[in-house]
Image (cartoon, grey):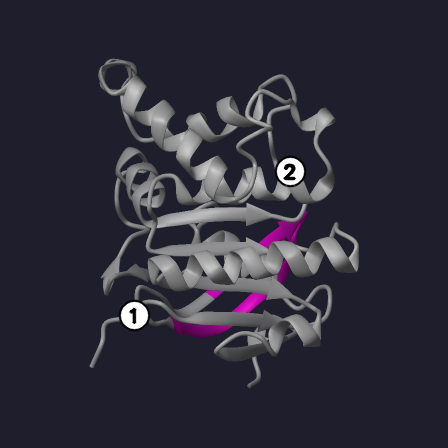
Amino acid sequence: MTTPVLAAAAVHKHYHLGRTEIPVLRGVDFAVAPGEIVALLGASGAGKSTLLHVLGLLDAPSSGAVLYDGQPVHQLPVRERARLRHRHTGFVFQFYHLIPELTALQNVQLAAMMGTSVWQYWQRRKAARSAAIAMLERVGLGSRLHHRPSELSGGERQRVAIARALLAEPKVVLADEPTGNLDSSTAASVLGLMFELQRERNLAFVLVTHDEGLAQRAHRIVRMRDGAVVG
């Protein structure tokens, strides 16, 4: 049996508001196989984004475990978790999270700096720049390398974010409402690109969405309600 590239085992997550404990995730079991596209579907407040943040090591579970390639990861030292997250996982968010002062190329090059020392990056900076240019060309932005986010359309910004997510050749991409900020035509184009890249690279994708139509394009749908998986 194939080991999941990413899994959650009995994951709970709660926050505190004063003395009140607010449960957000309630014993979530979840797994993604290599090369699989899974849609996390549910209404706002179902816990989808929180689960994505826990899976991506951006937040820690209150209890339970997250596993990368079958190995639990949250007990690792902070620096090791950061390196593992960079090598294993890419992120695409609804609002792009690009640095406005940097060009498209510089935003993508940042991905090559993560998880390495300044000296390591300096040694391979030319190769990193070439890889970033190639990735931007692959997503259709070869003529927009030196444009800042304010000079790009919403669809172009999301393509920069996709290029940045894929530069480190992750095994899985976590995408939180990746087309939620785009018009329907642009959304279809960006989604088509994501699925092309998924097939080319045999990537696993976890797509958080409340859009039933988008979810139907995934290999499998996992439905969430009130912080739990319900189907």
Give the Cα separation between the discs numbered 2 and 1: 31 Å
The answer to whether residue 111 is seen in the rendering is no
Q: Which residues are magenta?
A: 12-31
Q: Secondary structure at mark 2?
A: helix
Q: Residues within 10 Å of mark 1 (few under 14, many from 20)?
A: many
Q: Is residue 222 above or below residue 196?
A: below
| Image location (x, y in percent) of residue 144 | 60, 28
**Residue name at image x 69 percent, y 75 percent:** 213
Q: Position of residue 217 (x, y in %)?
A: 58, 75
In this picture, is 20 found above or below 157? Answer: below
Q: Which mark is residue 157?
A: 2
For the residue labelled by badge 1, is the local secondary structure a helix, a strand or a loop? loop
Magenta segment includes 17? yes
Q: Chief secondary structure of the magenta span?
A: strand
Q: Which corner quadrant holds the C terminus?
A: bottom right
The amino acid on which the numbered mark 1 sits, given as a three-letter code, is Pro
